[in-house]
Amino acid sequence: MSTIRLTVAQATLEYLKKQYSERDGTAAASMAQVVPKNIRSKRSKMLRGLSVKKRRSFYESQLGNNRTVLFESENKEGYIHGFTDNYIKVKTPWNPELVNTLHEVTLADIYEDGLVQINFVLNEVWV
């Protein structure tokens, strides 16, 4: 177990997978020794916590950098979300003109919800 923890803790993965479940027709369904669900849930919770910490650490390491963002199409509680070219999730106040456009931004800060605040570098839109 300690070897696995060390390996996962050192991983550079941005997101970690959810716990597995046995489904008919899969190898997991026919295994003789199954990890109890309560243990799987505990391990899954630990991995999700590690994933949040690693994502936050990665986001913090990118603050001040310029990146290209592709904005999505939904208005989410007055904000438009997007992803940088290295998969950092950002948000800025809703503007329908940003939908499905690329913009160069500076990663400025991290909001309380964990998404990154941006400042626009160029007014130029790439389509």
Image: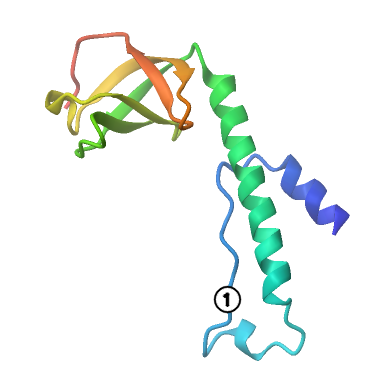
Within 10 Å of the Cα at label 1, are there few (<14), some (14-19), or many (20+) other Cα atoms? few
The image quadrant of residue 98 is top left
Instruction: Please tell me which residue lies in front, 13 or 33.
Output: 33
Left or right of residue 94, residue 65 in this image: right
Q: Quadrant of the C terminus?
A: top left
Helix, strand or loop at mark 1: loop
Residue 92 placement, left or right of 87: left
Going 64% across and 59% down the picture, which residue do you hit? 44
Q: What x and y, as percent, mark residue 63?
A: 51, 16
Name of the residue lying farthest toward the right = 2
Vertical order, 54 against 3 (above or below): above
- Residue 36 horizontal/vertical position (percent): 72, 77
The answer to whether residue 41 is above or below residue 50 is below
- Residue drawn at point x = 32 percent, y = 16 percent: 104
Q: Quadrant of residue 1?
A: bottom right
Q: Is residue 42 left or right of residue 121?
A: right
* Residue 61 vertical position relative to residue 25 in the rendered view, above or below: above
Q: Circle 1 sits on which residue?
A: 21
Mark 1 belongs to which amino acid?
A: Ser
- The percent coordinates of residue 82 (x first, y second) are 32, 32
- Indicate the position of residue 103 as horizontal and vertical percent values: 27, 20
Q: Residue at x 64, y 46 (%)?
A: 49
